[in-house]
Image (spheres, grey):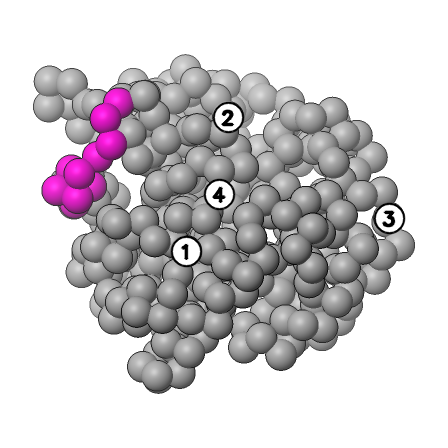
């Protein structure tokens, strides 16, 4: 990615952030500043779309189309426990060839050879969800197997060392389930795990959150470089804990903020979904018809953007309200 592309990406991201805070949205103004590929809907429901699974060639075509429309932009790939997804490595490689820095969000499925392949394909960062130091607690928080999550982190760390790569490894610790029983142990373990940082993160829905505000502040607010939890995330988690209504995020009346998704985010599902917010009626929910492309789908997506603008929820999940991470001396929002 050259200097001009970097500057354009940063200008576009700033423009979208301003636009998302305006009143009624404009599809022309609110062109996305980041792309999300959802290969697995674990934890949020099957939000990948209603069509047939996209082939690698179809994914490549959509990535090319997105870059032609928006120029190079950050790409986040959500795979949940499916780090072994057969299309994952090729998607990372192809996005890297298009100068799109790529981040992986997962909690299992990656072994040694797969980790090396991902780094060789150009993966720039990975978030691995860990919810405990014992199996029952971890499953109550994340839902997958603890050994699988640890093996994934170990494989990525060893591959990074072997390739001498600048892969950012972060541990996400969702504040839900029985996390309060072992969150301090998770933070201590993370320091020895080879990860570069750890952060508390909100779950998708305001439900099953432990009501322990003192522990939440003590762990999440620790003033050490290794802790990446943002103060705003702590405030929003407190609001979710106080009103566990089972809905996405928190009430805007409690948070005092607008939806962070705005028009900044373009999500593509493995079965053809096109959306900005994963909780609203998609702009497109299956295979594209009659050669219609992403710009056309977005341009007629006013109803979807209106749903977001009038939504009374504000989500604190790290994927919906991302924090900056430094990649190649450029601060990007994933």
How many labels sit on residues? 4
Q: Which residues are magenta?
A: 51-60
- The quadrant of the rendering that contains the N terminus is bottom left
Q: Between label 3 and label 4, give the one nearer the viewer.
A: 3
Rounded to the nearest angstrom, the CA distance separating label 1 from label 2 is: 26 Å
Q: Nearer the viewer, mark 2 or mark 4?
A: 2
Mark 3: few/some/many CA within 10 Å (<14, 14-19, 20+): few
Distance from the alpha carbon under mark 2 to that under mark 4: 20 Å
Q: CA distance from mark 3 to mark 2?
A: 28 Å
Q: Earlier in the sequence, mark 1 or mark 4?
A: 4
Q: Residue at x 39, y 61 (%)?
A: 110
| Percent x, y of residue 217 | 82, 57
Give whichever of discs 1 and 2 has the lower sequence position: 1
How far is disc 1 from disc 4 in space, using C-alphas?
34 Å
Q: Nearer the viewer, mark 3 or mark 2?
A: 3
The answer to whether 156 is drawn above or below residue 263 in the figure is below
Q: Is residue 130 rendered to the left or right of residue 22?
A: right
Rendered residue at 26%/23% (across/down):
51
Q: Which residue is mark 4?
A: 17
Q: Which residue corresponds to mark 1?
A: 109
**Spatial distance from mark 3 to mark 4, Cα to Cα?**
33 Å
Instruction: Say which label, 3 or 2, has the lower sequence index.
Output: 3
- Identify which residue, 261 or 44, lies in the foreground: 44
Q: Which percent across, then down, holds residue 209?
A: 76, 40
Q: Earlier in the sequence, mark 3 or mark 1?
A: 1
Res. 279 mark: 2
- Which residue is pictured at 52% across the width and 33% down the height? 44
Against 173, residue 309 (above or below) is above
Labels 2 and 4: the sequence-earlier one:
4
């Amino acid at each position: 990615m050259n200097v001009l592309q970097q500057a354009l990406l940063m200008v576009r991201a700033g423009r979208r952030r301003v636009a998302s805070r305006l009143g009624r949205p404009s599809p022309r103004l609110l062109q996305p500043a980041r792309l999300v590929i959802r290969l697995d809907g674990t934890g949020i429901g099957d939000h990948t779309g209603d069509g047939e699974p996209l082939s690698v060639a179809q994914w490549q075509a959509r990535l090319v189309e997105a870059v032609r429309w928006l120029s190079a932009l950050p790409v986040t790939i959500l795979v949940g426990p499916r780090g072994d997804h057969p299309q994952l490595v090729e998607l990372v490689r192809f996005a890297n060839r298009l100068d799109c820095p790529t981040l992986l969000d997962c909690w299992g499925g990656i072994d040694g050879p797969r980790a090396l392949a991902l780094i060789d394909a150009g993966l720039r960062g990975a978030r691995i969800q860990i919810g405990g130091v014992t199996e029952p607690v971890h499953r109550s928080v994340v839902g997958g197997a603890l050994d699988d999550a640890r093996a994934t982190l170990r494989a990525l760390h060893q591959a990074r060392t072997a390739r001498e790569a600048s892969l950012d490894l972060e541990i996400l610790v969702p504040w839900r389930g029985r996390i309060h029983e072992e969150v301090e142990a998770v933070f201590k373990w993370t320091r020895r795990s080879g990860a570069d940082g750890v952060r508390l993160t909100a779950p998708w829905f305001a439900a099953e959150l432990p009501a322990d505000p003192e522990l939440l502040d003590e762990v999440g607010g620790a003033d050490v470089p290794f802790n990446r939890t943002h103060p705003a995330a702590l405030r929003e988690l407190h609001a979710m804990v106080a009103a566990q209504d089972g809905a996405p995020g928190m009430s805007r009346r409690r948070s005092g903020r607008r939806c962070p998704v705005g028009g900044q985010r373009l999500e593509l599902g493995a079965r053809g979904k096109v959306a900005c917010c994963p909780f609203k009626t998609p702009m497109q929910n299956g295979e594209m018809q009659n050669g219609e492309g992403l710009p056309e789908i977005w341009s007629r997506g006013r109803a979807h953007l209106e749903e977001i603008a009038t939504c009374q929820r504000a989500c604190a999940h790290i994927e919906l309200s991302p924090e900056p991470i430094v990649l190649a001396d450029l601060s990007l929002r994933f």
